[in-house]
Amino acid sequence: MSNLSRITVALLVRKIRKEERFSWAVKAAEAFAPDYPGWTTENAVSEAFDDMSLRDAIVFAAFSGENMIGGSLIRPSCLSECAYELSWVFVLEGERGKGVGREVISACLSAAEDDLLGAVGTVILCCPPHNVRLYEKFGFIKGSPIHDGWVMTKILNPDGVISPLASKFTVRGRWNS
């Protein structure tokens, strides 16, 4: 019998700081590499930076101790004033199956709900086939096929008011400060 005990490190999910964007983009590229064999790290990092800096994205990272092990971002969608796009949800390969993805998705959904100020809103994402069940657990509904997956949507604050004044445009200063 060993005298060693198992130590569990708490998972911390938080908004990233601007100086952490490059590290976040590299980790995202690392996580997506097996699914996109023709995608170079350089291309992935460049695309992640574009997505983070455009359209007021809120970017989250999950940390186990000091190590960044996952992340996601949510940003206002160009489709509607009260619509958001959930994107770049990733968990490093060795950390999958431990609830990290659920935590970063929850953080993004909470940020969008807070931003709506009680108004009805929608979250849209493009989901690979192997993640459909995960998003369904969050209340997303599978829609049209797209690329190599599905468009999925979720209604936020379904009993809320329908008001363009309570949209993301009234509180833009909170996004990724």
Image (tube, rainbow, N blue to C red):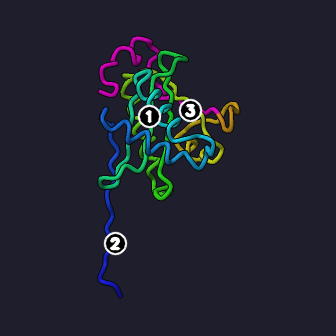
Dot 1 amino acid type = Leu
Name the residue carrying label 2: 6
Q: Is residue 16 left or right of residue 39?
A: left
Marks 1 and 3, how far apart in space? Answer: 11 Å
The reply to whether residue 157 is in sight is: no
Question: Would residue 172 be found to the left or right of residue 97 on screen?
Answer: left
Q: Nearer the viewer, residue 46 or 73?
A: 46
Residue 104 on the magenta segment: no
Q: Residue at x 30, y 35 (%)?
A: 19
Q: Is residue 174 on the magenta stretch?
A: yes
Please, what secondary structure does the residue beneath circle 3 have?
Answer: strand
Q: Which mark is residue 125?
A: 3
* Residue 5: percent from left, percent from top: 31, 76
Depth-wise, is mark 1 or mark 3 nearer the camera?
A: 1
Tell me which segment is drawn in magenta.
Answer: 151-177
Please name the residue shown 44% across and 45% down the image: 27
Mark nearer the N terminus (2 vs 3)? 2
x%, y% of residue 114?
Answer: 36, 28
Q: Position of residue 159 (x, y in %)?
A: 47, 25
Image quarter of the N terminus: bottom left
Q: Is residue 116 visible?
A: yes
Q: Are marks 1 and 2 in contact (CB under 8 Å)?
A: no
| Tags 2 and 3 touching, CB below 8 Å | no
